[in-house]
Amino acid sequence: MSTSSSPTQGFTVLEVLIAIFLIVLALGALEGEMAITVQQLSNSARESLATQLIQKRSEWLIASPCATSIGSDSSRGVVATWSTTIDRHVMWIDQEAHYGTTFGQHKDVYRAAGVCQ
């Protein structure tokens, strides 16, 4: 008497558990990457805002009559300070932008010059 064995179809419980574990592990890695990406986007947004504040103030000061001045601007957690000095017919504009990042406080320093008219 011979019995024929047919292969069983489907997955074992162990195979299903391993597959679920691997999927959860992959989703966890993606979640970690997404958190890093969100932090980097937030840092980039503050850096971009700082650059915009600095550029806007530089353009405004260069378009204004030459004079020694000092001041600050702020927007959404970015503080930009500026001062001007006059040397002969050149106005020097010194600026700093301070803002927080995920790594702590950051400072950018800028210097521009405009010809007095």
Image (cartoon, helix red, strand yellow):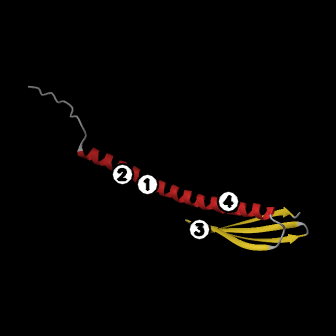
Horizontal relation, residue 52 to residue 83: left or right? left
Q: Earlier in the sequence, mark 3 or mark 2?
A: 2
Q: CA distance from mark 4 to mark 1?
A: 32 Å
Position above or below: 48 against 94: above
> Which-is-in-front pick, marks 4 and 2?
4
Q: Residue at x 72, y 60 (%)?
A: 55
Q: Which residue is the site of mark 2?
A: 24
Position above or below: 113 against 28: below
Q: Earlier in the sequence, mark 3 or mark 4?
A: 4
Helix, strand or loop at mark 2: helix
> Which-is-in-front pick, marks 4 and 1?
4
Q: Which residue is the site of mark 3?
A: 77
Q: Which residue is the site of mark 4?
A: 52
Instruction: Give the residue type that dot 1 points to.
Output: Glu
Helix, strand or loop at mark 3: loop
Q: Position of residue 4 (x, y in %)?
A: 15, 27
From the viewer's side, name the closer residue of 24 and 6.
24
